[in-house]
Amino acid sequence: MVVVVFRSRLKEGGEAELGKVGMRMYELASAMPGFLSYKDFVAEDGENVSIIEFDSIETVDAWREHPEHREAQRRARTEFFTEYQIQVCTPVRERAFKG
């Protein structure tokens, strides 16, 4: 499994359009082979954090290079975010408890 952590801060005024683009990106990503999950969080200080899981680095790379996703990346830099950080990680250890 590969985990992508996407941290960002929004520019003012672009929330509605980003919501539309984000929904389309979820539609595309979740239909791709190897997609496992997506969760989105907003911290009290306004930072957004998305955690996306894919089954391999190859599927992450395929998502990164998807043409519509590439256009969304371009728009993100010019229209939606003041800053962002992407971390692509592989778990070293995993534990779970479901009580």
Image (spheres, rainbow, N blue to C red):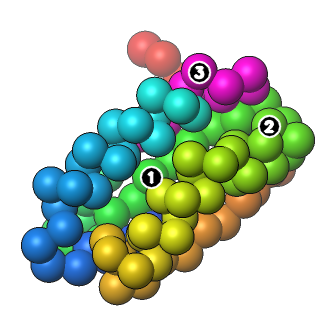
Crowding near pointer 2: few (<14 within 10 Å), some, many (20+)? some
Give the camera-side residue of 35 and 46: 35
Q: Does the magenta-highlighted stretch encompass residue 87?
A: no
**Local secondary structure at mark 1:** strand
Q: Give the residues drawn in magenta, as a range.
A: 30-39
Going 71% across and 35% down the picture, which residue do you hit? 54
Tell me the quarter of the image containing the N terminus. Answer: top right
Type of the residue with mark 2: Thr
Sequence-wise, the earlier of marks 1 and 2 is: 1
Q: Which mark is residue 31?
A: 3
Distance (Cα) linking label 3 and label 1: 18 Å
**Local secondary structure at mark 2:** helix
Q: Which mark is residue 50?
A: 1
Q: Does residue 65 appear anywhere in the picture?
A: yes
Residue 55 vertical placement versus 81 (above, below) = above
Type of the residue with mark 1: Ser
Q: Quadrant of residue 44?
A: bottom left
Badge 2 is on which residue?
A: 59
Distance (Cα) linking label 1 and label 2: 17 Å
Task: Tell us which disc is closer to us: 1 or 2.
Answer: 2
Rendering coords of residue 95 (x, y %)? 67, 33
In the image, 12: left or right of 86? left
Rendering coords of residue 47 (x, y %)? 30, 71
Going 85% across and 45% down the picture, which residue do you hit? 57
Crowding near pointer 3: few (<14 within 10 Å), some, many (20+)? few
Give the camera-side residue of 85 and 63: 63
Residue 62 vertical placement versus 71 (above, below) = above
